[in-house]
Image (cartoon, helix red, strand yellow):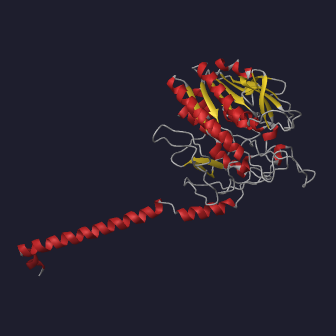
Amino acid sequence: MKQNWWRSASYYKQNHFVFKLGLSILLLGFGFRLLFSQSSNVIPNETDNNNNNNNNINNNNNINDNIDIDTPVLDNDVKPKPLDFVKSPKDISQFQPEDNESGKCDITDGEWIPSSGSPAYTNSTCRWIETHQDCMGNGRPDAGYMYWKWSPKGCELPRFDAKKFLETMRDKSWAFVGDSITRNHLQSFLCLLSQVEDAVELYHDKDYKNRKWHFPSYNLTVSVMWSPFLAKADIFEDIDGVSSSEIQLHIDILDKTWTELFDTWDYVLFSSGKWFIKSAIYYENNSVLGCHGCTGKNYTDLGFNFAYRKILKNLFEFILKSNPKSMVIYRTSTPDHFENGTWSTGGSCDRTVPAKEGDFEMSELNRLLREIELPEVSKAEERASEKGMKLKLLDVMPLSLVRPDGHPGPYRHFYPFAEDKNAKVQYDCLHWCLPGPIDSWNDMLMNLVVNG
């Protein structure tokens, strides 16, 4: 029968077609089965990852026997998507920085994810951490706040590469000009660089508010200039923020502390904002113009937003008329996370993980600061671009807003509960622990200056 089948040409042609069709279907089915069996080993199960991440959050990975870590250390390269933590709100105010470069990733729009890496430095490997921000040295018992990484939605934000930064900045000069949060930022910057080469301090004033360092192998100098208003101001306040009189702020005169040195720097980072909320009397042409929060004074209350806008306009006008070789960065104002009070009324911040959705909204005061600084920087950027100058915005508000766990809190003080577990101490929910979340500000800074 088999031989007769082969001998019938017409029968052969008909059945050969059927045979080929069946064989094709068989092979196609086998291919799909093979593809999907392999894919199940490559594509991670998102539900399983979330369950594993939530289980890992409960496991401690200690830096030493006395410090607990509340966040997971991951053993694989799969990006976790923890369900418990909020993505940074994109619309944190009615104003957002304008990005005219189509297709460019917005690094301010992202989320904090658990980090498998260790902090770039510690209080034992960096000697430039100010006592009030040395949370580890002051006895903070948890360390989970150090184990998070900012992850933009559409791209990667590389970690600060100190070696690459130092090579790029050879024979350059940097300055950080602003308030104590600017100094806080500067210390993170120094600590990151000092893991490659430790800085040598060249100068400091008696209060250590104006300082200068040098990295000898790279001939890089870094300065910090104390100028909380960026303008001329007489301040009557102690280290704990207690004032004996209203600030006298000259809104038409920029602070010569930094203006006299501006032309000597290659890169300058300015920031301000928080100090404008304080009570102040405003001067223009050396005469009282009005005030903010000056209860009992016979002056017109102009509001702090009036003074902030006026001084920012003066700042950018000065920059645009001055040194065109400098790259100027303006860093946005930053949030505080006081709960159940303020700095002076018993406010606290005891959280140990990033905020959950809806936990923190931008305060009205921060919103007003942001509504002023973003448009003013945007207008200045446009004018600078027309003149061939480099002026950029560093927007750290979105990623900072959801990090209430990153502040010193009671550990602004050395072991505040060592003698009395119920001791009443002043919390610092404004500045930031080092190492901590603000190290990511320098990831963003490097991306802006070196990689951008």
Give the total of numbered labels: 0
Front-most of residues 228 and 269: 228
Q: Quadrant location of residue 129? A: top right
Q: Position of residue 189 (x, y in %)?
A: 68, 34
Instruction: Pick the quarter of the image with the N terminus.
Output: bottom left
Residue extending furthest toward the bottom: 1
* Residue 275 placement, left or right of 76: right
Please tell me which residue is depicted at 64% across the width and 62% down the height of the picture.
Answer: 54
Q: Position of residue 210 (x, y in %)?
A: 77, 25
Q: Position of residue 19 (x, y in %)?
A: 19, 72
Task: Confirm whether residue 185 shows in the render.
Answer: no
* Residue 137 placement, left or right of 437: right
Q: Quadrant location of residue 204? A: top right
Relative vertical location of residue 423 with respect to residue 197 in this rendering, above or below: below
Task: Confirm whether residue 450 shows in the render.
Answer: yes
Please tell me which residue is depicted at 84% across the width and 24% down the height of the picture.
Answer: 206
Residue extending furthest toward the right: 419
Front-most of residues 73 and 91: 91
Q: Position of residue 382 (x, y in %)?
A: 53, 29
Please tell me which residue is depicted at 70% across the width and 28% down the height of the picture.
Answer: 177
Front-most of residues 179 and 320: 320
Front-most of residues 403 and 219: 403
